Amino acid sequence: MADGSIGLWTVPLAVLGGAIRVSTPFLFVSLGECITERSGRINLGLEGTLVMGAMSAYGISYLTGSPWLGVFAAGITGALLGALHAGICSLPRVNDIAVGIALMLFGTGLAFYLGKPLIEPTAPRLPAIDFGWWSDIPQLRAALRINVMFLIGVALAPILYWAFRTTRWGLLIRTAGESSDAARAMGYSVLLIRLRATMVGGFLAGIGGSFLSLFYPGSWNEGLSSGQGITAVALVIFARWDPLLCLWASLAFGGAAALGPALQSVGVTSGYHLFNAAPYILTLAIMIITCSPKRTLTGAPAELSITR
Amino acid sequence: MIVGEAPPPSGAFGVDAIAMTMRFGDFLALDNVALKVRPGSFHALLGENGAGKSTLVKCIMGYYHATEGDILVGEREQAIGNPKDAHALGLGMVYQHFTLVPAMTVAENLVLARDDVPAVVNWPKEMKELEVFLARMPFKVPLAAKVSDISAGERQKCEILKQLYLKRRFLILDEPTSVLTPAEADEVLGMLRDMVVRGELTILMITHKFREVMAFADDVTILRRGKLAGAGKVSELTPDAMARTMIGAEELTVQPPRTGEAGMARLELEKVRALDDAGAIAVHDVSLTVRAGEIVGIAGVSGNGQRQLVEVLAGQREAESGEIRVAGDPYRASREEMRRHKMSLLPEEPLKNACVGGMSVADNIAFREFDRAPFASGGWWLNRGAFRGDARKKIAQYKIKTRTPETPISALSGGNVQRAVLARELGGDVEVLIAANPCFGLDFAAVAQIHAEIMAARNRGAAVLLVSEDLDELLELSDRLVVMFHGEFVYEARTSEADLTVIGRHMAGH
């Protein structure tokens, strides 16, 4: 145990650290998608929103020197993309899933186009808080260098859980998602509720993207997101549209994504690419286990196009 | 006439609709209709499906904007642009389709319905206020229960309570008792009637049940095909006179008399168990025998497992356990078995469960036989001429109103879709017939025709299983009655000896 070497303990520590780092974008995107889906609409375009958020955050942080302005810009970009999705879906006979796929391609394409000049320069990054100061094991200290964004995300989950039950907006979003007839009969505009829910969802997904470019991995390039946006959408289904479960599910997916690099760091290299695929295998396995042809998903908002 | 925005002062008020005309494109849904609801009265609005009842009340509630005509609320002319305007005037409506959110609790639904939902809801305080409100009401609902977990009857009470909680003083009820047992219906309507008598409320009720009109309503307005067909005091009218006004001069199919005796067992269910979509047990080990030349009716409030049972028999749902036998052979709802045993199905919502909406009437009529001669050669080459010829014959025989045999079936009215399914299912020999709510939402002419066809099939020796939420229909057609409650058969009687109160009690689970 000399020289801070802790042998195989490296793997769970790296997975823990990875879970915290990698899970942050999952967390923001899934909480955002949770809001959107509870209002009765699926926004698959969040993958594009995530990448656009990452690009705009990096650009604004580079131009202004303030990473927090970058985070805000990413949120605004996300909200605009959300408004675009909701706007198109407000038209008659438009399918939200098809629009989502189109916006996913549009968002990533636009981000690559606009982000070309941002690959070279280095933008100021988001700070981290050192929660491992009490330990002298470097791996543990590395695992516990936690970004504020993660903490915000962790706080957001119970806040959303509370808001869905006790605020007017929470109740209205759920009404629109569970029974648009009921919402209309009460005199509310379902389209307007969904527009706002999709914009808030986009805002959070954009912020999730800013974490990618401003903290971890912490640079802008075209391979930045490897499907986190889409995985987070699947994660909402896995989490049964419950913000608290979204938190746990994000941590689990983050840990799975960190498995490959963690094993590599202790010298297990043979199945590297296979282990890197762990989150996708986890997605598939969860979907297969939790789905049944004989019953509908519990907790699914009744107005979602996948459950209707 | 005074034009004003403010709601009338406290107590019940009346509503008048004057010379209402409503056009949807070329279709004239309302033609110069007048409706006068006196303050503090219980008014019934009668009419067949498509007579314009719903259109009329939706115009009053601001859902539709009438092409011509005026609405007077408490003798003041009002421009009601949307439901919120109507609510502000004290008008409320209980819809035929529930407007409660199933995934939310009763309390959440009630608070949400208010116009002034606080930005942050103080649940302990709201719950206390709701309990105080409920204490004043003659019927109770469980506040903390999810709406999806309470019975259809409780939901209907909830809908009405919601309107009273919102302090509405003019209530429109759209077929409010269709999901209630007769006893529940009497309880709910009786309580509302008391409020009307006390002068707290005016009620306009859409219905087609003459029993309820005679027992609870003061006045009645009858519509036929978008026109005012009659109006008057209920005490001066008979059900027969009202029915004649509703139907007009149309000739109804005469039902053949019940002839012949029940023969051998044709359809046997033994301890059949089935799950619903959420994975809970919906059909709980039911056993039943239906004999040739017999109609067995299954009564029950909707949502007690009837739908799942019919889906198992139709092959749309797998049974978890148990056995079904047709003419002694095990039955697993394959196409081959259905053909061999000459089984016919009239499922509920025929457009969804028995038709392909986008395909033509001719194709839909040929579904059972489309891959056999004369419709197909060698089992694969389809002879379109034979489709058309057969369809023409059946369209004439079953009086299906369609422009051509090639018209997509989804373009037909509900009654004509059901007639097309009837033509397919009853056009040949029938040994077993399973029908589920076959007349739901259809007009008198279609109902009479379908009832006549079912009775004729029985007389020809078919074993008929009739699942219906309409007790009158069951009492009219069945030889034997079974009551289904919570997935079980809880009561059985010969229809000739059946007692309506006993049946109603079992439907409610007592």
Image (tube, rainbow, N blue to C red):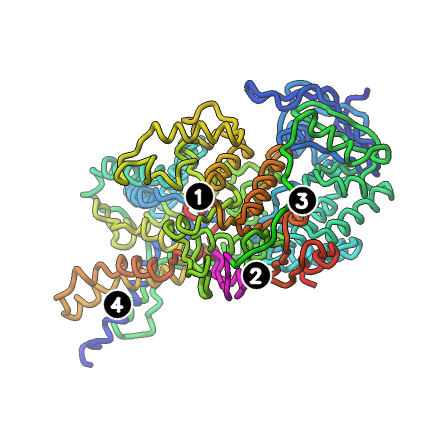
What's the amino acid at mark 2? Gly
Residue A41 has which mark?
Answer: 1
Q: What stretch of residues is rendered in magenta?
A: B266-289
Vertically, is B417 above or below B267? above
Residues at badges 3 and 4 in contact (C-beta under 8 Å)? no
When asked about the image quadrant of residue B123, the answer is bottom right
Q: Secondary structure at mark 4?
A: helix
Tell me where residue B275 appears, x and y as whole percent: 48, 60
**Separation (CA) of disc 1 from disc 2:** 34 Å
**Separation (CA) of disc 4 from disc 2:** 53 Å
**Separation (CA) of disc 3 from disc 4:** 52 Å
When asked about the image quadrant of residue A12, the answer is bottom left
Q: Chain of mark 1?
A: A
Q: Nearer the viewer, residue B19 or B423?
A: B423
Q: Quadrant of the N terminus of chain B?
A: top right
Of labels 3 and 1, the one closer to you: 1
Extreme-front residue of the structure: B260
x 71%, y 44%: residue: B163
Residue highlighted by disc 2? B487
Q: Nearer the viewer, residue A257 or B239?
A: B239
Q: Alpha-carbon neighbours of circle 2 within 10 Å: few (<14), some, or many (≥20)? A: many
Residues at badges 1 and 4 in contact (C-beta under 8 Å)? no
Q: Chain of mark 3?
A: B
x 17%, y 66%: residue: A264
Residue highlighted by disc 4? A14
Question: Residue B508 lies in magenta, yes or no?
Answer: no
